[in-house]
Image (cartoon, helix red, strand yellow):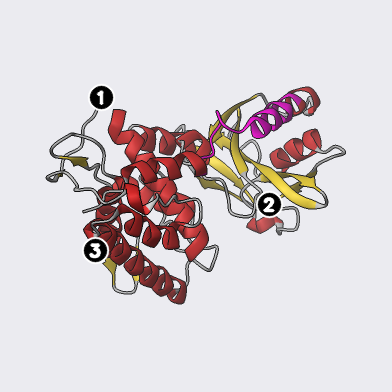
Amino acid sequence: MANAQTQFESFHSTILLDYDTSQVLRDRRETLLKDLKNNISDDAPAYEHFTQGSYALHTGVHPEGGNPDMDIGILFDCSPDDYPDPLKLKKYVYDALTREGRTVNIKNPCVTVTYLKNGEADHHIDLAVYCSNAADQTQLAWGRTSTPSEDRSWKSSEAQKLTDAIINRFSGDDRTQFRRCIRALKRWRDLKVGHKNTPSIGLTVAAYNWFVPRYDATDGKPRDLTALTDFVNAMLNHWIGSRLYVHLPVAPHSDLFEGMTDAQMLDLKDRLEVLRDVLKDAAAQPDTHEACKALRKQFGDDFPVPEKTDTTKQASAGVSTSGRSA
């Protein structure tokens, strides 16, 4: 039986995108924060910044077709009552960052800075604007310039608490495997799901809820193939009627898949069932070469396929159902 652990780890090394591996995004981030500090209006309240999203969670993946992104939170020292129109704070950020060589747009959830290369979007950085209410709960500035005043609002959004919860869900080798499997599933989503309404954070929180680390019972080494199979199975087992519900573990506790139509949800379920079957078949395959050929069809050309002559090996005795934390 194949376990393809070497190939899963090699695949992960190829697709991972994080703060330590992207010098370009690191440099852009530092430049933007410097511009914000130097150019923001004197009328703006004091602020602090933090990294959020996949960079903060260490689950970033090189996107198919380029245009990687980074998410930054800008937390102003004020309350929603001080700025009933949240666009005023977003405009401070917009004005401070607008300059030649980049395009800046105010979108509903953030201010987006996009860098172009040969006339095409090369990468972008999203800056979400926050303040805190009287209960010390962070509120996200929601709305764009074209949004009617009555529809602009502050929405509960505890990004920092979410980051802490997910990062601390596992530790040591368990955490490393958790991140590898999330990245693998995100790359699969990019390749196999034909719409953009299946959010990365939804997959990540699903893993927060249902992922269980798996190790070989004989040698104690991680077994990503088993862990990923079990995780996909868990997602399918949590379907309720026609939908999968994955709620944020922090305020506002919203369903992260609520933007998906029933047709998109059915498509996601069908594709997860195919993935589950391929994973199970790969694990039962005695030849790692053949197992990896099947896995490549799900995860793309970055998933390595070893030479056939090197791959007909017996797997070890079994897989542990318990994780290990360090």
* Residue 107 tag number: 2
The x and y percentages for residue 119 are 82, 52
321 and 300: which is toward the camera: 300
Residue at the extreme right: 100
Under circle 3, the secondary element is helix
Within 10 Å of disc 2 (Cα), the crowding (few <14, some 14-19, many 20+) is some
First in sequence: mark 1 or mark 3? 3
Marks 1 and 3 sit apart, C-alpha to C-alpha, by 29 Å
* Residue 326 tag number: 1
Under circle 1, the secondary element is loop
- The part of the chain drawn in magenta is 15-34
Residue 38 vertical position relative to residue 142 in the rendered view, above or below:
above
- The residue under label 3 is 237
Does residue 195 appear to the left or right of 282 in the view shown? right
Identified at 48% across, 61% down, the residue is 198
Q: Quadrant of the C terminus?
A: top left
Could you tell me the amino acid type at mark 3?
Answer: Asn
Number of numbered discs visible in the structure rendering: 3
The x and y percentages for residue 166 are 37, 38
Marks 2 and 1 sit apart, C-alpha to C-alpha, by 41 Å
First in sequence: mark 2 or mark 1? 2
In this rendering, the label closer to the viewer, 1 or 3? 1
First in sequence: mark 2 or mark 3? 2
314 and 63: which is toward the camera: 314
